[in-house]
Amino acid sequence: MKLHYREIGEGQPFVILHGLFGYSDNWQTHAKKLADYYRVILVDQRNHGHSDWADSHTYQDLANDLHELFIDLKLEKVILMGHSMGGKTAMRFAQMFPKTLSKLIIVDMGTKSYPMHHSEILKGLEAIDLNLINSRGEAEKMMEPFVDSPGVRQFLLKNLYWKEKGKLAWRMNIDVLSRDMHAILQALPKDEVMIPTLFIRGEMSNYILDEDWDDIENQFPDSTLVSIPNAGHWVHAEAPNEFMESVLGFCLR
């Protein structure tokens, strides 16, 4: 699949993968800072953003899509960073195509399987009848009984766009993402990755627990863990300065 992407800056390629229900726009602020040092490439993964929709959504699919982009853009010695679902895509890619990477950054995602925890979000998304609404405000009211957090609602509603006058549509393929959620939440294969890797977690997040670290290190022996205080799963948005210091400290050394 030909993925949609945008790029900024020059130099060594630095590829960024968004998380579930996100798209490349979520990372523009960080991309502008990284572009002082790198050729930054922001990617929309399949079934998200401006990339095409497909009837399958596995990490094998996502890694192969990314590899096709690497070939098309002739990318080598890439720094690859992914958040959440994008972090698992990045790890699977590193297992499958290690020679293309120089460094790996995984943002608040482990190698393990995760229990289903998106049920209310999916109910909120499915509650929105696009045939009955004329604004994002109306969509938010339909979602509100299922999604308490205003910040999460706004994050999700960024995926709505005007397909035509008076007609809103989703940029994400909710049907396939809902159906393939088991694949999105599953554990990585056990292949070892020798690429220098930085794991960044928010201290208030439960995606990488202390007891997970031994298993992560077994698969990623050349890895470091950084915990950022007062931040949760969206650590890059909640503590942007500390996050960027950690990223650049790892990449520029």
Image (cartoon, helix red, strand yellow):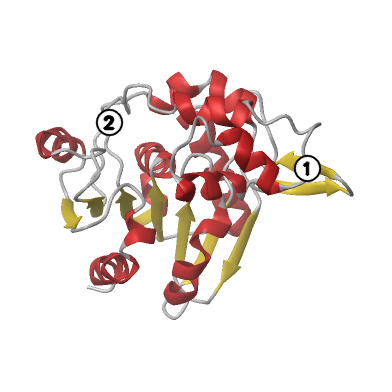
In percent of the image, x 50 and y 67: which residue is there? 40
Q: Is residue 214 left or right of residue 232?
A: left
Q: Position of residue 97 (x, y in %)?
A: 41, 42
In percent of the image, x 26 and y 41: which residue is there? 193
Q: Is residue 121 above or below residue 233?
A: above
Amino acid type assigned to the residue bearing label 1 in the image: Leu
Q: Closer to the observer: label 2 or label 1?
A: 1
Q: Secondary structure at mark 2?
A: loop
Q: Secondary structure at mark 1?
A: strand
Amino acid type assigned to the residue bearing label 2 in the image: Asp
Report the disc number at residue 185: none
In this view, the residue farthest toward the bottom is: 36
Give whichever of discs 2 and 1 has the lower sequence position: 1
Q: Which residue is tagged 2? A: 191
Q: Position of residue 136 (x, y in %)?
A: 68, 47
Label 2 Cα neighbours within 10 Å, binned few <14 / some 14-19 / many ≥20:
some
Q: Is residue 252 above or below residue 89?
A: below
In percent of the image, x 61 and y 24: which residue is there? 176
Q: Which residue is tagged 1? A: 168
